[in-house]
Image (cartoon, rainbow, N blue to C red):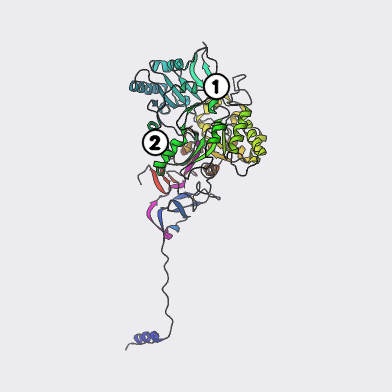
Amino acid sequence: MKPARMLAIALAALPFPALPLLAMEAPAVADLLFINGKVITVDKDFSIRSTVAVKDGKIAAVGGPELAKDWQAARTIDLKGRTLMPGFIDAHLHMKGLSHRSIEPDKAGSIAELGAMIIAKANELGPGEWVAGTGWDEALLAEKRNPTRADLDRIAPKNPVLLVRAGAHSAVANSLALKIAGIDARTPDPEGGLIERGPDGQPTGIIRERTDLVLKYVPADSPAQMRPSYVRALKDLLRLGITSYMEAWTTIDDEPVDRGGIAGGGGNAVRGHTFKQLAAIYADEGETLPRGTLYIMYPGAERLRKFPHHTGFGDDRLKLGPIGESAYDGGFTGPTARTSKDYKGQSGFRGTTFMSESALNEMVATSASLGWQLGIHAIGDEAIDTVAKAYHTALTASPKQDHRWFISHFTMLPTEQTMKTMASDGIWTTAQPNFTYNLEGRYLSVLDGERLDHINPMATPIAQGVNVVMSSDNLPIGPMVGLYSAITRKGMNGHQFALSEAISREDAIRLYTAKAAAVAFDEAKKGTIEPGKFADLIVLDKDPLTVPVELLLQTKVDQTYVDGKLVWNRTGD
């Protein structure tokens, strides 16, 4: 027998204990695994990672390349260096449906193109039928001016026409529409609004703020007719990387109604959708849509007391937010924002307000007593001072912990004392830095000096301790414009406003994700890429932290995920 064989037999006979097999830990199982990317987590430290595991609609793990060895998934997405980040959360926008009688003025590049749209719709509907639409912006028209009554008369003399400007603080009507509304040279300016007139005293067709004077004559489509266009509008947000939004114009009415002027609690007219409408849509199609939080327009004390719900009612797909957008003043698309000094070149004109201070105080106190968060519209510096004062009065009388009341817009710098009071009282703002880009021409025409330089301030209120959140208010909705203008302070034609109000890329992203989640009390559920939070994620074709700043405007959303489900795919991956 060979020596080696003999040794093996001898060793086998020795009384050694059996050695256990080494346990091999099986990889954890995920539904989805993202690898090889730049993951902007937007966590407390703004950590950058490369791998994310998703299970049951939530983030399961976040880490480096080694994480891919610890998880196996039904589907693995190789990001190939692309950026993965939390979905954008737009804290103030207006979801709009499209009536069968509506055109889309925002898609026109000139008054001539606008005219072609009107003619096509008038031919489709027939003589005498109303033609309507929302979204024109003179800055985007080749003529660089407002369309007028005369323009619309030449285009459609046999159809009443009403076109609301982007921002909804003004509109243009033709002669037939004005006649139906009873507006002529003798009509006085309405309370809270202004009828623009030419040198001959005749209306130019432009009505600021009180567009309800004409809108109430435009026949409304039924909720059933409007529903498909609402669903399209909501799904379009996913294309922009918006996985959650706060809708700023919703009513508690059973059916959509025209709400405008003083009666509507705001200056501009709204053919609002209702909580009931949107709840029905989400009951059927919510899993394919971004998450929604609804501002409710103040319906008056008696009706609000009878309404059985308040802020927070609903679920993670659709819920009630603040009493908000109910406007204290107008806006610069009018322009009618209430300012402390005269508008440039308009002696004695400082904009307008839509309610008395006593009515404002009543709205705040009643809403707060019924369990509502507040998010009132204030754009001009005097309006901001006044709304902040109303909030302070209510909170002094009835202190509240972590209420997260906010001022919508905060377009001008108020007094330093106002900002200190806001910081002390815990008052937030939902700001729109994208206004700096799109309303560049309006600001240059009506403001000057420091108030022009510091338009749409970001850095100053943050330095004063005010919580600031970014949003769009539809001018435009695209978050990339908001990021660009918050960082560069540039308008669309290149004018650069005070760089002292600029913020960093990291801060801009945080304000459009994590901070926007927090203003809706959702910071524990979304806004960052951390374990336990919803897998509401977007894949970008460029890195917003390093791409040349001008290319931010060209950055595209390749994919959007809500609850870990792919709901938008530009690339077909």
Give the numbered dot on residue 193.
1
**Which amino acid lies under the numbered mark 2 shown in the image of this protein?**
Arg
In this view, the residue in front, 485 or 307, is 307
Q: Residue furthest left?
A: 1
For label 2, the residue is 232
Classify mark 2: helix, strand or loop: helix
The magenta segment is 68-97
Per the image, is 86 magenta? yes
Q: Position of residue 491 (x, y in %)?
A: 51, 31
Classify mark 2: residues with Cα within 10 Å, few (<14), some (14-19) or many (20+).
some
Inspect this view and state whether residue 431 appears: no
The structure residue drawn at horizontal position 43% and vertical position 35%, both measured from the top left corner, is: 277
In space, the residues marked 1 and 2 are separated at their CA atoms by: 33 Å
Q: Quadrant of the N terminus?
A: bottom left
Q: Residue furthest top?
A: 200
Classify mark 1: helix, strand or loop: loop
The structure residue drawn at horizontal position 63% and vertical position 31%, both measured from the top left corner, is: 386
State whether residue 244 is above or below residue 37. above
Inspect this view and state whether residue 189 appears: yes
In this view, the residue in front, 36 or 384, is 384
Q: Position of residue 473 (x, y in %)?
A: 50, 33
Q: Position of residue 229 (x, y in %)?
A: 39, 33
Disc 1 + disc 2, Cβ < 8 Å: no
**Which amino acid lies under the numbered mark 1 shown in the image of this protein?**
Gly
